[in-house]
Image (cartoon, grey):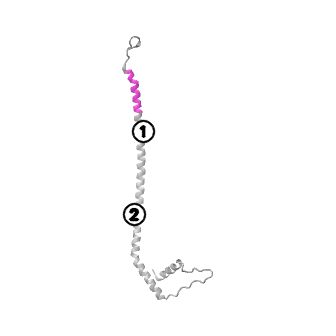
Amino acid sequence: MTLHRRVFALALAVLVSGRGLAVEPDQEPPRMPAVEPAQALRALQREHEALVAQQPALQEAAGQAATLASQNQQLEQQIQTLQTQVDGLRDEAAALRADDRRRWFVTGAAVLAGGLLIGLIQPLLRGRRRRGYGGFR
């Protein structure tokens, strides 16, 4: 950052902190203490050195943020793919349940039809019995 930008950032920070130009109706605006340019320059140089020391950590954090963003995008795509698979498997399970019910219905109908057929054919296979005198036996 250039010196002008640092001075502007410092002035902005002072304004935002509330120690700036806040004036009450009956008071005079507070006067800024006289700061020597050499002191201001030394303070800004110290701030510059501190910011330069923080720069690698900030760059690493920015790189991690980009990595996390790409991982997040990949995970979102995996979620969509898995959700599609889950929906397909749910549809398949519903179709299998319907097929199973249909199979049981057909099996029950076949058992009923077979029972009716046996019930109708069995009396015909016995043959007629002859009755004795007066029908008593």
Span colored in magenta: 109-124
Q: In the image, is residue 104 above or below residue 26?
A: above
Q: Residue 42's quadrant in the figure?
A: bottom left
| Residue beneath the point at 40% across and 27% down | 117
| Residue beneath the point at 41% across and 31% down | 112
Q: Nearer the viewer, residue 122 or 6?
A: 122
Residue 24 screen position, x and y as percent: 60, 80
* Quarter placement of the N terminus: bottom left
- Mark 2 or mark 1: name the one nearer the start of the chain: 2
Residue type at mark 2 is Gln
Residue type at mark 1 is Arg
Q: Between marks 2 and 1, how big is the CA–CA gap? A: 46 Å
Q: Which residue is mark 1?
A: 102
Q: Which residue is mark 2?
A: 71
For this orientation, the residue located farthest to the left is 126
Classified by dominant secondary structure, the portion drawn in magenta counts as: helix
Number of other residues with Cα within 10 Å of mark 2, as a class: few under 14, some 14 to 19, many 20 or more: few
| Residue beneath the point at 40% across and 60% down | 75
